[in-house]
Image: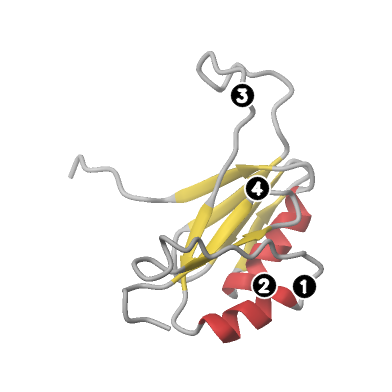
Amino acid sequence: GDRPYFHSLVLDCAEPRKNADFYAELLAYEVVYADDEWVTIAGPGPMLSFRSPPTTRDDVADNDVPQQMHVDFFVSDIVTAHERVSTWAVAPSIRRPADAEPERGFRVYVDPAGHTFCLCRRSKTAW
């Protein structure tokens, strides 16, 4: 059909391989493509790609703001997921907003390139 489907998410970062390795470990994905400027990982969900920021902004429609990205991941066991993320050389920035905790429940972390990502519960009763 003509309906788009989610294929891949691309994140700009100074060290594509370092960030790809981080997310490959987090998600149990594998590197499926890599060159000096672009690395793609794949697994059971959508692919993630990491690229060196372009030297020109021609590929971003009249936007002076650098590209950024925030990724959310569902987890069924926040304690185990938190321990796993915290063992890597990435300092987590853990926040659980008081107003969001009962409804959504999430914790915010920072990846090696400085992008934030969240570990989230699937429902109000998860965790």
Which residue is labeled 2 in the image?
25
- Name the element at disc 3: loop
Task: Tell me the amino acid under the disc marked 3.
Answer: Val
Q: Earlier in the sequence, mark 4 or mark 2?
A: 2
The quarter in which the N terminus is drawn is top left
Q: Which residue is label 1 attached to?
A: 88
> Across the whole image, how many numbered discs are drawn on residues?
4
Q: Are marks 1 and 2 in contact (CB under 8 Å)?
A: yes
Q: CA distance from mark 1 to mark 3?
A: 30 Å
Q: Residue at x 77, y 64 (%)?
A: 91
For mark 4, what is the residue? 50
Q: Which mark is residue 65?
A: 3
Sooner in the amino-acid sequence: mark 1 or mark 2? 2
Residue beneath the point at 55% across and 54% down: 48
Q: CA distance from mark 4 to mark 1?
A: 19 Å
* Quadrant in which the C terminus is drawn: bottom left
| x and y, in percent, of residue 72 in the image | 48, 59
Say whether marks 4 and 2 touch (CB < 8 Å).
Answer: no
Q: Is residue 78 above or below residue 40?
A: below
